[in-house]
Image (cartoon, coloured by chain):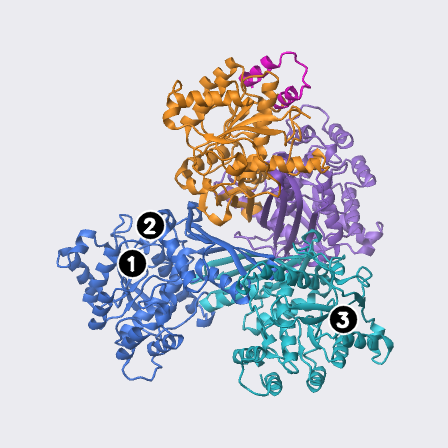
Chain colours: A cyan, B blue, C purple, D orange
Amino acid sequence: MAEKIRLAVAGVGNNISALYQGALLYERMIAEGASEKELPGIKRPRIGGITVSDLAFVAAFDVHPNKVGKQLQDAILAEPNNYPRLDVGLPTSGCRVAPGLTEAEAADRSGPGFRRLVDQLRRSNAEVLLYSLPTGLQWAAEAYAWAALEAGVAVVNCTPEVVARSPEIMAAFRRGGVPLVGDDLASHLGTSVVHRALLGLLSERGLTLSSSYQLNFGGNEDFRNLRDRGDSKRQSKLNALAQEGLDTSNVEIIPSAGYVPHLMDHKVAMLNIEGMGWAGTPVSIDLKLKVQDSSNAAGVIIDLVRIAAASRRRGLSGFPAAATRVLKSPPEGHPAYSEAAVQESFRQLDGTAFNGDGSRALADTASHG
Amino acid sequence: MAEKIRLAVAGVGNNISALYQGALLYERMIAEGASEKELPGIKRPRIGGITVSDLAFVAAFDVHPNKVGKQLQDAILAEPNNYPRLDVGLPTSGCRVAPGLTEAEAADRSGPGFRRLVDQLRRSNAEVLLYSLPTGLQWAAEAYAWAALEAGVAVVNCTPEVVARSPEIMAAFRRGGVPLVGDDLASHLGTSVVHRALLGLLSERGLTLSSSYQLNFGGNEDFRNLRDRGDSKRQSKLNALAQEGLDTSNVEIIPSAGYVPHLMDHKVAMLNIEGMGWAGTPVSIDLKLKVQDSSNAAGVIIDLVRIAAASRRRGLSGFPAAATRVLKSPPEGHPAYSEAAVQESFRQLDGTAFNGDGSRALADTASHG
Amino acid sequence: MAEKIRLAVAGVGNNISALYQGALLYERMIAEGASEKELPGIKRPRIGGITVSDLAFVAAFDVHPNKVGKQLQDAILAEPNNYPRLDVGLPTSGCRVAPGLTEAEAADRSGPGFRRLVDQLRRSNAEVLLYSLPTGLQWAAEAYAWAALEAGVAVVNCTPEVVARSPEIMAAFRRGGVPLVGDDLASHLGTSVVHRALLGLLSERGLTLSSSYQLNFGGNEDFRNLRDRGDSKRQSKLNALAQEGLDTSNVEIIPSAGYVPHLMDHKVAMLNIEGMGWAGTPVSIDLKLKVQDSSNAAGVIIDLVRIAAASRRRGLSGFPAAATRVLKSPPEGHPAYSEAAVQESFRQLDGTAFNGDGSRALADTASHG
Amino acid sequence: MAEKIRLAVAGVGNNISALYQGALLYERMIAEGASEKELPGIKRPRIGGITVSDLAFVAAFDVHPNKVGKQLQDAILAEPNNYPRLDVGLPTSGCRVAPGLTEAEAADRSGPGFRRLVDQLRRSNAEVLLYSLPTGLQWAAEAYAWAALEAGVAVVNCTPEVVARSPEIMAAFRRGGVPLVGDDLASHLGTSVVHRALLGLLSERGLTLSSSYQLNFGGNEDFRNLRDRGDSKRQSKLNALAQEGLDTSNVEIIPSAGYVPHLMDHKVAMLNIEGMGWAGTPVSIDLKLKVQDSSNAAGVIIDLVRIAAASRRRGLSGFPAAATRVLKSPPEGHPAYSEAAVQESFRQLDGTAFNGDGSRALADTASHG
């Protein structure tokens, strides 16, 4: 078994609760005799030899008064977090939540706040920093990335903030010999991927799309906050459909149709598709999807942090193509990374690729696709 | 524009009503200025140069007293048919429904009943015989195929009866220089293809399938008759899922959950999928699909009869690989026909393939996949 | 047959389009031989002897440039109206849409704008003014009511603005001998009534409500405008549930979950109810309701305008109890009007009640419940 | 607290598993401090002073080899039972499952099999015999009733077999001074009651029903066995709707649309209602109901056995009107029992009624409605 990933987290929300509890749950399943293939919800039992329970949380940062100063195993259960309490014991982590950067501290990279962050990352011996603050804080995403780079810590950016897509930041990580994974994770089983699969099926079979809508709602902080940011998310989702060649003129997407507190961390999506078959006669599809929203994130984060850690351990820098399929916005856009490049990247991480100089190969992958 | 296909039909059920009315409707749309790309529900506007309205019905056979002796445009509207009356005029077809073969007549290929059928096919100058009697009459499917072969008429078998899969019959068609297309059409947008797409998505994303069910019900004769034959259909659908590598131990399929007369020719399917994501937390999908059942068939039949006619016009015999994707049981099974072979077959039919001897190439396709 | 109701309308939106086209459609059905009992969607074929097609539109007011100056039969089809064009001819109405009151004109009841409105109502010989401007214009609702009173025209207020509930206005209508019907119509088959029926069923059967949500969305102007006003509507819907003794602590209502333009004038509602039965084991209900939103209003408006007209014809003033069941906010609240009072009111309008002095009886009903 | 009901059960299926485990679960909730009002899924915390956990199982009969001879707490968990194992301890009951009557034994009431049954009932000191064998065994239902009567034990018949509706049997129980409760329990929250509520709502609001269907499916023995008996159950459900004055010409009910083993003891129902509102424009309702099937029975059985026990304790005989609302087929049909009679019956059982001679009053209620 591989050494556990030494993981630092910026933002102690539901995603971290899911990741933290889930890793322990899988650890227990394995201890109780489950084979790696039997673990539920796991696509790749190992990446670079690392299993899904090989996580050691060594540093955590947040600004919420319910979380700062708490042991991590307590902070993940503090409100407004509302991911379910899984049926697994939560031993003392030894990791205490430190105060996160303020906007003022982030602006001054030689000031005491920023220097303290770099120092904490260094002293923690973290291999990977997982950035998962609430969406919309571009300043924070950048500051944590620069701090991690200085400390030699690989970064995974779960949010839509521009980090891995920033040519400046990516170049600096390459120069610094540090992996940078992002941006914006694709859900494990998201509404978009289901919607796309069905619209694609209609198109492939030669039926004509008449209209479609998609509504998402839920009970966690994302849905409480999203109504305002709904328009940009709506447009980005429509763009994603349009990029696949689908006519979106009669397609409507409501990223946050409502905040329904008692749904807690569940997300519910309603899809409707109306189409025409032979002789213009109608076909209709109605679908309800219900997921544990933060499990939907953690199921992907577990791959991203393993890719980041395995890259770092192999001395690779920049963007590892292996991460492409579980990201919404990889640095060069999806078409830049062929399936062959993705598979080659996984082989590199697993140590089964044949090129001698992994570092250069990875950089090439990133720049040439 | 290509010459219209001279089409004979065995069985004048809802599928023929959909095909007959739909072809006229598309003809009117084109006459009113619609471009071929604007036709709703059509994947391939032309196959071998033939459009979706290039159909001339030249012979029809049925045994139902409501249909025999009637003009075809009237017979398609006779009970128990219940496909909707589309908004298009139905001019006199000039084609009268002749009495179909009885089981006794079918058994004696030198008897007067069988000879009369061969004679009628010959005199009609039919290019293609479309076999779409109710499911379960293996003797009828074979008899019509042998009669068509003798008359030099290509055959399309819409039913699960074994015709194109019969090595004996296929060999005879090849020797006779006549195309044979079958068996069992895949619906235009069937429950199975939707179910497979969603189960495949779960698997591809690494979620674990917990259980799934699929119920189909409707109001046409298929659903009235299906309850008895439900078990074989259930097993064949489960086999289809299993062949794709899906674990079907907790998957249940009810091909005919009920006969609901007022649904008429609509089919409704209910799908449920329960799965597990990260940490075993649940995901669930509920889907309702509603289609016009016989449009769902006609949207595929229109391709099969064009493939059969174009093959015959080009002097090809045996099974045209182009038909593979819209059949449930092509002669050698799906894996025998690569995407490249299918595309090459379409190019042959369109006259854009480069090999000089179409006939031999087609036979090769069929035998080598 | 009764004389047609001479109807004036303030606001020419989808509701008026539904009412206008529907009345003509029913007229044609009756002319073609349909009995009153066969008319679809009609609870009371006659009220005070008046049928559902006994409508003559004699005046119309609106401020939208697409509508002002147009013949009413054209204005009802002008954007942003998007009620469907029913399959019925629309002969010239002879009624032209006049410019509606501005807020400034409404404020000065002796000014030329207000005087012109009173004059137009008088000259039209209208019996009833139907007020159905967009929600939220209290000043307009009041001004139209005062103008109607001055012109001796009965008023029906379809909106939640306070008109019939205003003691001052109601007293003035009573003194003036004019009927006043309102406020806020209950939909013919609204989401709330379905939600209440199911929650009530759970309660009556002794199951325990765990949680519930209701989402509404659609494609007409109401849904475009509603997101802002959603909070007050949400609270009023929750209050309505609470008044029936239902515990609403885990019930969430989203009056406008989204604006989906291609749904046009359709409204879709999604309901979910989670409960507990014996031993706390779960029961769940998921429901999708789809209605033609403005038909849902017109199906109730047709009763309200007939009640208003019949009241006026019988010399009754104030609020007729017959209107209670199809209003959300009758003057004294629902409990003030017993079923017996409602039935007695209908009998008065039908001329089958036995009390000699209808006027006083009606006033009593209104004041004593 | 009242003395526990001494309960004998004929048939140890899922219903008994639900009843047995549920009673223990409620007992623990109360022991842990829950008030009677907080118990989930309970309409009447007490009937005749008896709580929902006041059950002592003193005798049990079954013919299945997996059950006969086992302790009852083990037998309820034996296949084919598949009610969930609730989260409550199952202490040794001291009640062992005895072999049930065979058809031959039932036919000879002076034979050793029947005599042994009477004897066992007597020796158990049972107050109530709950009859819940699989549907369709009229001979068994009668035999158990006669045996119980001879032993002086009240009977509750959960099945549609004719017992309480049999004038001969009812008269014998009255003469014998023993209560007899049946026939056929109405589910706690059944598909029929939900369907009726929605169809009734449409009718009450004046919308026109176009068509409707109801499909039920599940994974317990009822659904495995029901396909054959589906037709009679379908007709009885349609009759029930028709009796409420609903037009059922376009209503279809499929009592067992399918056996889906992985659903275990869950029942799923799909309802669709299509109607017409104003101007004939469409309204549609789609509903999915999911329940724990045997909890749905146990939630009603708990009332019936308490009613039977309380009746017996008060010396009442024959049919107690209090049972009417949770039965499908009370002796004289539903209309025979007014709401007042039902409430009076409950008051008798609670000892709060004022008539001195409870026995006679009860007999009167039964015979006069």
Res. B78 mark: 2
**Picture quarter with the N terminus of chain B:** bottom left
- Give percent across and percent down for residue D271: 52, 45
- Give percent across and percent down for residue D37: 70, 34
Residue interval drawn in magenta = D342-369
Using the rendered image of the protein, determine whether residue A47 is visible from the camera's viewpoint: yes
**Distance from Cα at disc 2 to Cα at disc 1:** 25 Å
**What residue is disc 3 on?**
A137
Q: Secondary structure at mark 2?
A: loop
Above or below, D269 against A165 in this view is: above
Using the rendered image of the protein, determine whether residue B39 is visible from the camera's viewpoint: no
Do dots 1 and 3 share one subunit? no
Q: Secondary structure at mark 1?
A: loop
**Picture quarter with the C terminus of chain B:** bottom left
**Distance from Cα at disc 1 to Cα at disc 3:** 63 Å
Q: Nearer the viewer, residue D12 or D352?
A: D12
